[in-house]
Every structure is written in structure tokens, then in C-alpha cells.
Amino acid sequence: MRKIVLQMMTTLNGRLDDLAAWVHDVVDDQYREIDRIYSTFDTVLVGRTTYEEMAAYWPRALAEHAGTETNQVMAERMNTYRKLVFSRSGDNPLTEWADTEQVIVATDDELVTYLENLKRQPGKDIHPRRGTLSHAVPARRVVRKRSGESALRARERADAPRPDSFTDMLA
């Protein structure tokens, strides 16, 4: 059975917010390590906002040969992954991008059922990308492996208000 694996960048003290404030440059050996981890995935789970950010960057990065060789490997990977974009309603059209599917889940139960069925399909592991989805999926107990466990605990202790359900968080 496939796993849903949460992988994210964090500081040693567990900071997850505002990447631009603390990630100034990702050097090639860091990209190689990220790529090694990403090579174990073939599907990414995203919300619409994260999807639109990815769709604006990765196809262009590949076409324009932007960045280092390692960045190009990552661009190839992002462009060939299966991308599942979660929404409550599906009312907002998505930017066209290869191998993208919009998944409409109106309730937390529908989300859990969808993800449990997805894990039973053949393929590599599944990665929820940053954003709303990466914080909501672990709370629904469908993630079996976590990278950056202490950072997640720090996020759980944050004073930020928490919605009653994942689907309340979807745009």
C-alpha cells in the first residue's frame, strides 16, 4: 500500500512559516537531497492556491531551462507528477497543466475516503504539498510517515485559530 508522506522544509527550532524570511538560497546539494526524497513520490496533493503557484513556475522553469541542473530535474519531476487539486466546490477553474485532476470533497469523511482509496492504488508514495492541505491531512490520520515531526508538533501548539474541519479550510 502506498503511503502519504508529509515532507517539508523547517528550521532546527521548528519554524515553518514565511519561507522567504529564512530560506535565502537552496544550494545544489540541498536540492539533490530534496530530489532524492521527491523521487519516492509520483502524486502530489494540493489546494488550489498552491497548485496555481506551482503551475505558474514549474512548466516555465522546464521550458526555459531555468536554474541549475538539479532544479531542472525537479522541474521535470513536478511536470510529470500526477497532481490532485482539492476543492470543496470545484467552482474555480484551474490553470491548464499536464496530469492535473480536480478532486471535489465536500466533507472530511469524503476526504478521508478518497485518500484511503488513493493509497490502495498502485504507484509510488503520495506527497501533500505545503499549504492548507499539508496541515489538514495529518489531522485526519491518513499520513503514516512524517518528515519534520517536531515542526508539526510546534504547529499544533501554535495560537492560530483552528477550523472545525478540513473542508472549512478549502477555498
Image (spheres, rainbow, N blue to C red):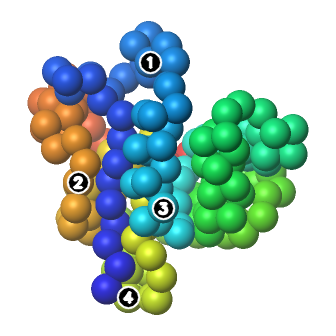
In this view, 52 is above or below 159: below
Q: Are marks 1 and 4 in contact (CB under 8 Å)?
A: no
Q: Is residue 153 left or right of residue 11?
A: left
| 2 or 3: mark nearer the eye | 3
N-terminal of the two: label 2 or label 1? 1
Question: Quadrant of the rendered structure where residue 15 is?
Answer: top left
Marks 2 and 1, how far apart at CA: 21 Å
Q: Nearer the viewer, residue 85 or 61?
A: 61
Residue pointed to by mark 4: 120
Residue in view at x 87 percent, y 38 percent? 64
Percent x, y of residue 56: 76, 39
N-terminal of the two: label 2 or label 4? 4
Residue pointed to by mark 2: 146
Percent x, y of residue 152: 20, 40
In this view, 32 is above or below 77: above
Residue pointed to by mark 1: 23
Marks 2 and 3, how far apart at CA: 16 Å
Q: Is residue 17 visible?
A: yes
N-terminal of the two: label 4 or label 3? 3
| 4 or 3: mark nearer the eye | 3
Residue pointed to by mark 3: 39
Instruction: Identify the amino acid type marked 2.
Output: Arg
Instruction: Identify the amino acid type marked 1.
Output: Val
N-terminal of the two: label 2 or label 3? 3
**Local crowd size for mark 4, using a 10 Å CA cut-off: few (<14), some (14–19), many (≥20):** few
Marks 2 and 4, how far apart at CA: 19 Å
| 1 or 3: mark nearer the eye | 3
N-terminal of the two: label 1 or label 3? 1
Q: Quadrant of the N terminus?
A: bottom left
